[in-house]
Amino acid sequence: MLCLGIETSCDETAVALCDDGRPLLEKLASQIKLHALFGGVVPELASREHLRRMGPLLDALFREAGLGLADVDAVAVARGPGLLGSLLIGLAVAKGLALAAGKPLIGVDHLHAHLLAATLGREVAYPALGLLVSGGHTQIVLLRSPLDLTVLGRTVDDAAGEAFDKAAKSLNLPYPGGVFVDRLGAGIEPDRALFPRPNLENTHLDFSFSGLKTAVATHVARHPGLRLAVMPAPDGPVDAAAWPLDLRRVCSSLNFAVADTLRVKMERALDGLDVPAVSILAAGGVAANSRIRAMLEALGARRGLPCFLPEPALCADNATMIAAAGCLLGRAGLTHDLALDAVPRGRK
Ligand code: KG4
Ligand code: ZN
């Protein structure tokens, strides 16, 4: 099954083709530089950019793949969670293409697609315990199969990505700051006592990262020299070694606090399962974080469980994951009609 995937849930406009779950080609236009000017995603601008970028991306995708709309067997689109106006652009395009091609339309849950990205091209055994860590979500998910998901824990306030981005903002690092914090902290010993590992003194699997964000902001307020006088360009830190050591230690300590909080809840989840998990996997933009990846790999090794992590490009928002999810849902007959609606808050 050749599936076209469309992703417009936030600030990446992306289209991709997958053939029976095998990635063929992706065309992606990031809006990060535009939103970085405002210190975060501006929903109205995001919708307009999706509309402006979508046509040229589709043209390039089909031209470079040497394929046409008539070759496509199904059109999959992220229906949520995400920004409503942005989702509606993707849905409108997907409906038009599905109608024109006379092929099924498949609405995909964006978070489900993130998790499936970890399984692309791999033989994953189930049940698997998944960690979804993105800009808007932090969840521990039990996957009994690729189509049978149960959320075991979620954030009660900020997501892990928000904690990274808001902490980065207090250091005057550009939006989205997660990648800066990751790279600046790499190779530096963290101060393990500097920041709290929130919401661990309990028995449940929910997260709360807003206190961590505040702890970083308070620390920076007490040590104003940490805050950069000039915000760097949003392209990512070029030479981490050239940056102030005290700033790098703050970043390393934040990477540690987030990774270790995730570790404790993942261990708790593994210990509490009725049927033991036989694999672990992670997904979402924050799953690109090097300390979190190392933590998950070590966790898998300790428990004798294979650990599946998407390559960094497949951690962030992309359309390959939507097309791959579309192949899976389409094969299972889970298609939609043209009444398909956006679900900006996601499925319950
Ligand atoms: O999955 P994603 O691309 O979009 C959402 O669906 O939210 O995740 C974006 C989030 C942002 O908060 C960004 O700062 C964070 O992922 N992020 C990282 C890293 N790369 C991206 N956080 C920590 N370390 C990274 N290397
Ligand atoms: Zn996402």
Image (cartoon, grey):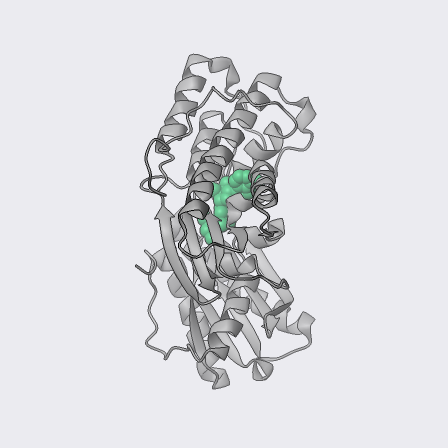
Q: Is residue 303 left or right of residue 111?
A: right
The number of numbered discs placed on residues in the rendered structure image is 0
The residue under the point 51% across, 35% down is 259
Give the image quarter of residue 187.
Answer: top right
Q: Nearer the viewer, residue 83 or 337?
A: 337
Figure check: 177 above or below 15: above
- Give how far across and how far down residue 213 sits, in percent: 40, 29
Q: Is residue 44 left or right of residue 239?
A: left
Give the image quarter of residue 15.
Answer: bottom right
Image quarter in which the C terminus is found: bottom left
Figure check: 179 above or below 245: below
Image quarter in which the N terminus is found: bottom right
Figure check: 324 above or below 154: below
Q: Is residue 214 left or right of residue 292?
A: left
- Give how far across and how far down residue 172 sits, in percent: 49, 27
Answer whether residue 187 is visible to the viewer in this image: yes
